[in-house]
Image: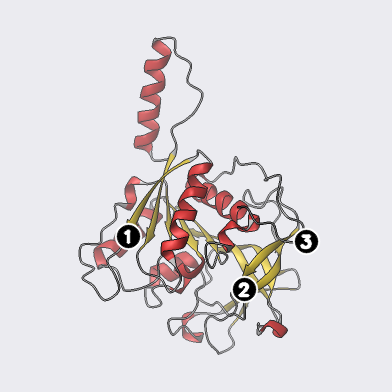
């Protein structure tokens, strides 16, 4: 929550107290979803993300939609600084320099950022963005973009081998393995839980600075994968800001997977506040089968 919203909330509480009115709930945090271009169906996923966030009653959600691909982007200038957290559901044309700098300034000053699935495909040449997301794929990324980030022998490992950045096999159910059970996002979650029929992103690479792997999935070569334990959930520190990066959530149906819902909502709250107040859902899956909500 920004200091202006804290001040406004305090003022309201003070007035209510003087009138003898008991107020128990804080105002919702402000979240902004950015979309408008994507190699995935953002028209389908943004409404689901918005609904999930609003159902927690923790967030009031706005959406900033860019002009279509190959249109004039000069007027696309979301006011990031007015929000507690920004959720990127965008990959496409370059933003104006002013908009890029506004996002950098916002996160640097302590803003929260969530990188959702294909948003890690975006902006392969934007240095600060790649530092904010830690690793990404496609867009011509290769060994010049930075190392691969994998989980090997119980720890995060940087692999500088040459090769492509980004790939996945066919969509399939897969297990997510928690690697940091003490982080607020993953604390209390099952150590292994099943996710529904998603693209298992592999071969992601980038600067990989100030990144913590929270959970991984095994990218099976039989599924045209890398044969590595690939990061699925990550946090990144960027100056004073907090970034939550989830590789999950290909389309609307995958966003109904409880594995996605729980981690996305907890990750977004953490990016906004540095804490997680949400309980682990009662329908959280274990290691054997995914759970979908209608």
Q: Is residue 281 above or below residue 201?
A: above
Q: Earlier in the sequence, mark 1 or mark 3?
A: 1
Residue 156 visible, this orientation? no
| Residue at the right extreme, as displayed | 288
Q: How far, Cα to Cα, is label 1 from label 2?
A: 27 Å
As helix, strand or loop, the secondary structure at mark 2 comes to: loop
Image point (58%, 79%), residue name: 148
Residue contact between numbered discs 1 and 3, judged by CB atoms under 8 Å = no
Image quarter hosting the N terminus? top left
**CA distance separating discs 1 and 3:** 37 Å
For mark 2, what is the residue?
200
Residue 171 % position (x, y): 62, 75
Q: Residue at x 29, y 52 (%)?
A: 79
Give how far across and how far down residue 44 sits, in percent: 45, 62
- Give the class, few, some or many, for how many residues have Cα within 10 Å of label 3's Cα (few <14, many ≥20): some
- Is 71 in front, or is 13? 71
Q: How far apart in space, not on screen, are marks 3 and 2 (Cα)?
A: 16 Å
For label 1, count other residues whose C-alpha is less than 10 Å away and answer few (under 14), some (14-19) or many (20+). Answer: some
Q: Is residue 280 above or below residue 99?
A: above
Q: Is residue 174 left or right of residue 141?
A: right
Query: Which residue is found at the position 53% from the left and 87% from the top?
Result: 164
Which residue is the site of mark 3? Answer: 287
Q: Which residue is mark 1?
A: 65
């Amino acid at each position: 929550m920004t200091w202006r919203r804290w001040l406004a909330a305090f003022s309201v509480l003070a007035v209510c107290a003087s009138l003898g009115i008991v107020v128990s709930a804080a105002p919702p945090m402000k979240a902004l979803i950015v979309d408008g271009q994507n190699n995935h169906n953002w028209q389908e996923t943004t409404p689901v993300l918005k609904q999930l966030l609003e159902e927690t009653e923790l967030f009031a959600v706005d959406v900033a939609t860019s002009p279509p691909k190959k249109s004039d982007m000069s007027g696309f200038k979301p006011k990031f600084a007015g929000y507690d957290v920004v959720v990127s559901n965008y990959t496409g044309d370059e933003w104006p320099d002013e908009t890029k700098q506004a996002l950098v300034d916002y996160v640097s000053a302590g803003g929260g950022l969530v990188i959702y699935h294909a948003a890690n495909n975006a902006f392969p040449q934007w240095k600060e963005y790649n530092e904010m997301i830690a690793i990404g794929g496609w867009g011509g990324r290769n060994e010049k973009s930075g190392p691969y980030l994998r989980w090997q022998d119980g720890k995060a490992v940087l692999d500088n081998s040459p090769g492509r950045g980004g790939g996945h096999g066919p969509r399939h159910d897969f297990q997510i393995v928690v690697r940091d059970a003490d982080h607020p996002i993953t604390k209390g979650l099952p150590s292994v839980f099943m996710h529904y029929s998603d693209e298992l992103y592999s071969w992601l690479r980038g600067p990989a600075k100030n990144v913590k792997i929270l959970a991984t999935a095994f990218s099976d070569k039989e599924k045209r994968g890398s044969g590595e334990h690939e990061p699925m959930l990550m946090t990144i520190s960027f100056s004073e800001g907090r970034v939550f990066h989830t590789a999950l959530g290909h389309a609307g149906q995958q966003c109904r997977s409880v594995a996605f819902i729980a981690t996305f909502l907890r990750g977004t709250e953490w990016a906004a506040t540095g804490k997680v107040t949400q309980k682990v859902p009662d329908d959280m899956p274990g290691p054997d089968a995914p759970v979908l909500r209608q």
